[in-house]
Amino acid sequence: MSTDNHQHEPESKKKEKKKFHRHLTKYLTERDTVFATIWVFIFIFVLGSIPLNLGVINPIKLSLKDFDSNDMSYSKLGKAKTTPPDSNIVVVNIGTIDREGLAMMIDKVASYHPKVMALDAYFSGPRDPAQDSILRETFAKNPNLIAASILQLSGKEGDTAVERGNYFKTAHQFAYVNFFQDSISTFRAFEPFYEDYAKKKYTSFSAAVVKAYNPEAYELLEKKGHHHKVLINYSRHPSQYLTVDFDNLMMMNESDSAIFAHKIVLFGYVNNDPNDITDKKFTPMNKKFYGKSVPDMNGIYIHANIISMALEKNYIKKLPSWVNLLIAIIICWFHMSFFIHYYLESHIWFHLAAKLAQVASAIFFVWLGIYLYDKYRLKVDLKLSLIVIVMAVDVIYFYEAWAVWMHRKFKYRTVFKPHNH
Amino acid sequence: MKKLQFFILFTMIAGMLHAQNTYMLYSYKGNVSVVDNNTTTAAKLGKTLSANAIVKLGNGASVTLLCNQAAMFSFSKAGSYKLSSYTDLCKPGKNSVSANYVKYVWAQMTKDHGSPGSNRKAYMNTVGAVSRSINNIWVDPRLDTVNYSTGAFPLSWKSYASADNFDFKLFSSDNLTTPIFQKEVHKKKIPIKDFTSAMKPGNTYYWSAAIKGENNEELKVLHYYSDDDFQKFEKKLKAQGPESETEAQQAYRLAFMLEDAHFLSEAFKYYQKADELDKDNVLYRNTLMSFRKDYELK
């Protein structure tokens, strides 16, 4: 009796397994599945090729314009929360101090022998002559200080650059602090280098710091950033960088020199008040990863994150577009097979099954993207995959009509029949 | 053999010494001092502390420490913290993004978000105006002066701003600057019983509530009566009733008169008693329910 049961159970399980397997694979190799998949991509291509901005009145498209599901991992899933602070970098908050005070801060830090100092503030013109003179002198006597400049682009192609904000010419090195992107978008990437029409190369602020601190790390950055934007791997919140303000700095003496000695010291404006958005940018670390929000991170911490990334060599790898396309095709193909199965054989459940599959797939693929990003720093663009899953259901209706018409006209072999359901 | 034992002992001691955590003062706010090697010094950013150091925090101060260049932790409540008692915090944090994702998706799928139209309590806290020296706390004028003898009665307030944490402070009448009791509360009320140990019967006290981090200079009065004094007063009230009064009627009358005399905790007791004695009386029931609602007695 018991032996009978034992023989029975595996068989029923096998049957169930087979049944489930059939749901997914029965139509997998049908030409209809393949052609319906192709039609999904034709639709996406055609809709994407319309030269009109149809998203102008589409609130979903507008609200998701800057959306990246990986941002959720910072704001909701605790990514980077436990990253240890970067002991190579110290941020000095310059606040709203005047030029004389700034010179005093730089000189004081310089006396503790940091390896590199970088000032994330630019000066467009003269102010008080006495103060200007002091700061000019400070710039001149600190060869390890990198000063900020801004690149002003002109010309039809934007390939003529003029350096601005470098009023004090005594600095030994200038580096641009521009980010080539919309100021209200999330800062996800930066250009380490800029080449003008004459192939003159300009180095960005962060890249200049990396070069001065660790030439080996710079070589890799140069390789990655040659004519390319580099994705920023945000590994630390502002609180994970040691930040020293004016009062702290003035209280320090020679015994505290270890804080700065042989390190990178970044001078920049820091404000923890969420209502003060001076020099604050939107980053993936924003507490709100969708919808309306306020900028969350001071520019100096974005530079700090870039420098940390370059020094730790933990760049984000991005999958090539063709791989993303291939993934989308495979996902679409499997979904199409599953949907066609329900469409033809259990039509009454088709919409329910399709919606459930769409929700489950969306949750799964968002997780997959987040997992790969968190674990392997691999950025997979699964947006297209999610779009094809959504579109597949609608395309089936079109495909059925097309296949039946083709069958009547050209004897096209299809599993769809008129009034099949 | 002895040499071997000595070597093992030496290795163990060396290992223990090596395992000692080192701390760095990473950031601080307010009045923070450090006791290290029996020397007390003011907190200094970047200061290295030994495993046996003690960090002392004044009111409103906070400190973040970095342990072994790997783990960060903070203290934000006033008090003394012996670092050797917090070695567990030196372990680098483990964080599973995948597990958090599952929790987040599940929480979002099962959470009822409500809407401004249906959940007035949650959505009517957004204020469309600036504050000009008016604090964000409103106390019902009926709680302006409270006479109290016994019972679990709360002091409550309303907040114009969206806040989860409030500072409750109790002052004695001879010192209105340093509170004799203070507590951070997460609700907009605090039972008087929570701080009766800080008071002496027969005295007058002042209290205030403020959103955490803000100041509220508006003080309310709390008279703390001894049991004897209250009983004398209660006896007087009892004697004022007509002879034909039932027990329920008397309880209701006493409750009304006690409420009028600001003995709110005691009034509540009598409203409950009246309701229990005459359960069919709609007036008693409604008055009790209103009283509960008005004074946040849930």
Image (cartoon, coloured by chain):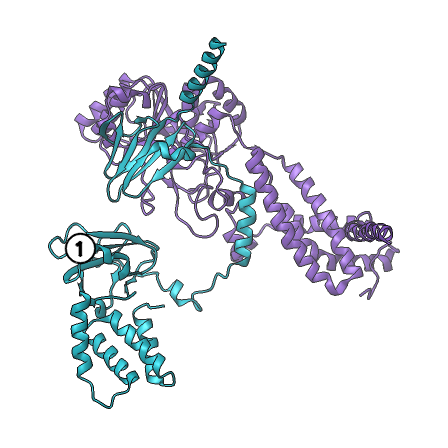
Chain colours: A purple, B cyan
Q: How many marks?
A: 1
Q: Position of residue B291 (x, y in %)?
A: 30, 74
Label 1 Cα crowd, 10 Å radius (few <14 / some 14-19 / many 20+): many
Q: Which residue is mark 1?
A: B171
Q: Residue at x 34, y 28 (%)?
A: B24
Q: Residue at x 79, y 60 (%)?
A: A344
Amino acid type assigned to the residue bearing label 1 in the image: Phe
Q: Nearer the viewer, residue A204 or B88?
A: B88
Q: Secondary structure at mark 1?
A: strand
From what the image shows, is residue A177 above or below residue A341? above
Residue B117 visible in rendering: yes
Answer with left or right where residue B242 lies relative to residue A268: left
> Can you say which quadrant of the picture contains the C terminus of chain B?
bottom left
Q: Position of residue B161 (x, y in %)?
A: 31, 58
Q: Residue at x 25, y 66 (%)?
A: B150
Residue that protrudes farthest toward the right in the picture: A411
Residue A48 visible in rendering: no
